[in-house]
Image (cartoon, helix red, strand yellow):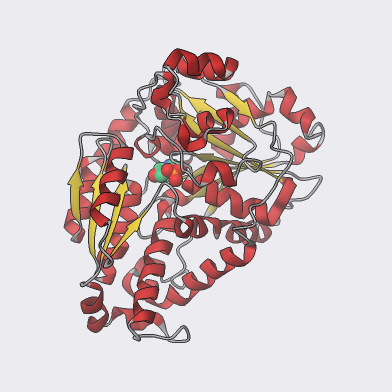
């Protein structure tokens, strides 16, 4: 194993800056290749979508907030013209073209992007169990999952997960609803209200005064050797990935509805906050499957936990952690407090992630406040990590020329993916808001 100094020296300028917790924008030199993994096809993603459709009658029944969407867990895609103006003012770069906010912060059931992957994985487990026990066929109306005999069956099984908070919330809520025993292993970053809420829903919460990795490892260990326990592996699960990837086709439909064109002349830019990489990786994969080279996908991470950037730049993926370059992994963006990237995502998206930016923690509150003040949309600090990425990409001459975006950039659509926030208690949200100093004092 190399020492911290050796690691930093070996990987050049960008990693040196990252080791000092400086903000960076890394452009993926392989981003033009757009190579898809032969392991994950559109067919696989469609199978996940079909499963979510089968469960829609059940979801509609047990989560009445999904009534309007017919039991489909989906979020609005919103214009944010006042925020667009504000961002132009704050960052000194005009966002010509269209700016949209994808409000996964307001996804029904669990209020974060984890409602996509997490709920899909638990539904798949439930379906597998019910099929194996001869309780259903794929043609049945899945409202049947509300019956007591299903709850009794599932109570013999358990689900385990390690999380910084939001994944635990998603897994806990859906698992408890189906009747599974559920064990959520929470890292030190997890907020108290998330643990309280989970316990209230009937989940067993196990707390660690340690990092996310530790929580995941403990969850894995507890599930090991227990054939009745399903472990949701945030560091490499394909079922999570597929759930996230269904966002691609859903987004395409929403864009079409808004008459937003995406083609050679009208590029699409997506900006998503990144923790272990599963959510932004799966969503980006689904989007690139639909829009190919016309879509540009950027991730954003905290300066103290830039694990995906480090894995991608070094090519070491999950074989290097931010601690290896001397960073502490500590961040106010609790959903992004991850020191080592997914073993699945970096490799799978090696040529599909177009770039990664990092952001200082203090700035998150400023963007949180700006969005609340201008649009009355409230999202959590983690979800604000991308808000300056657009300006930095637009100012990046290297990127624009690499993709011949000169004139086309004016016709681009930019989507900020808001990843969480609607379940944050009001007083907690007020505290975040009050921490904003960056822009309010100017
Ligand atoms: C989990 C999460 C992310 C990032 O997802 P990963 O799969 O960990 O990369 C971003 N924002 C919020 C609010 C999250 O909860």
The answer, for residue 22, to whether it is visible in the render is: no
Q: Closest to the observer: 2 or 146?
A: 2
Where residue 416 sits: x, y (%)? 55, 41
Q: Nearer the viewer, residue 360 or 12?
A: 12
Left or right placement of residue 240 versus residue 64 in this view: right
Q: Residue furthest front?
A: 1
**Is 98 rendered above or below residue 290?**
above
**Number of numbered discs:** 0
Residue at 38%, 85% in the rendered image:
136
Percent x, y for residue 379? Answer: 40, 41
Q: Quadrant of residue 229?
A: bottom left
Q: Report the residue at 48% width, 25% height from top.
A: 359
Say which quadrant the N terminus sits in: top left
Image quadrant assignment for residue 56: bottom left
Classify 48 as above or below 255: below
In the picture shown, does residue 200 fall above or below 434?
Answer: below
Return the residue nearer the eye: 124 or 230.
230
Q: Quick check: 414 left or right of 403?
A: left
Ligand 1 visible in quadrant:
top left
The answer to whether one can see residue 287 in this image is: yes
Residue 277 coordinates in the image, percent (x, y): 48, 42
Q: Is residue 294 above or below residue 83?
A: below
Q: What percent of the width, then of the height, locates residue 156?
A: 21, 72
């Amino acid at each position: 194993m190399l020492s911290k100094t050796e690691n930093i020296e070996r990987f050049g300028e960008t990693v040196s800056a990252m080791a000092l917790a400086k903000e960076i924008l890394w452009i993926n030199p392989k981003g033009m290749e757009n190579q898809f993994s032969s392991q994950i096809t559109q067919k696989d993603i469609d199978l996940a979508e079909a499963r979510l459709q089968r469960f829609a009658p059940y979801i509609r029944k047990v989560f009445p907030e999904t009534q309007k969407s017919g039991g489909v867990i989906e979020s609005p895609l919103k214009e944010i013209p006042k925020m667009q103006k504000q961002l132009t003012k704050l960052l000194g770069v005009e966002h010509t073209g269209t700016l949209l906010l994808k409000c996964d912060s307001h996804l029904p059931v669990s209020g974060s992007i984890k409602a996509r992957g997490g709920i899909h994985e638990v539904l798949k487990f439930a379906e597998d169990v019910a099929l194996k026990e001869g309780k259903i066929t794929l043609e049945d109306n899945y409202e049947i999952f509300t019956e007591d005999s299903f709850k009794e069956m599932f109570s013999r099984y358990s689900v385990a997960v390690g999380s910084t908070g939001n994944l635990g919330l998603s897994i806990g809520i859906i698992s408890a609803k189906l009747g599974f025993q559920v064990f959520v292993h929470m890292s030190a970053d997890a907020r108290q209200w998330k643990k309280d809420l989970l316990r209230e829903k009937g989940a067993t919460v196990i707390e660690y005064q340690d990092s996310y990795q530790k929580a995941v490892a403990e969850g894995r260990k507890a599930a090991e050797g227990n054939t009745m326990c399903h472990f949701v592996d945030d560091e490499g699960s394909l079922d999570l990935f597929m759930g996230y990837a269904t966002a691609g086709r859903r987004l395409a439909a929403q864009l079409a509805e808004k008459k937003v064109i995406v083609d050679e002349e009208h590029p699409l830019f997506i900006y998503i906050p990144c923790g272990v990489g599963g959510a932004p990786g799966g969503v980006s994969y689904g989007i690139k499957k639909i829009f190919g080279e016309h879509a540009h996908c950027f991730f954003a991470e905290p300066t103290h936990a830039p694990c995906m950037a480090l894995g991608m730049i070094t090519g070491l993926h999950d074989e290097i952690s931010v601690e290896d370059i001397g960073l502490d992994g500590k961040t106010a963006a609790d959903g992004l407090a991850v020191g080592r990237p997914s073993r699945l995502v970096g490799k799978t998206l090696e040529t599909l992630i177009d770039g990664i930016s990092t952001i200082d923690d203090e700035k998150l509150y400023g963007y949180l406040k700006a969005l609340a003040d201008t649009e009355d949309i409230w999202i959590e600090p983690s979800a604000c990590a991308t808000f300056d990425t657009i300006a930095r990409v637009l100012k990046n001459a290297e990127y624009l020329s690499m993709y011949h975006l000169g004139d086309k950039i004016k016709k681009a659509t930019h989507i900020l993916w808001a990843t969480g926030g609607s379940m944050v208690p009001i007083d907690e949200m007020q505290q975040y808001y009050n921490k904003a100093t960056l822009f309010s004092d100017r």
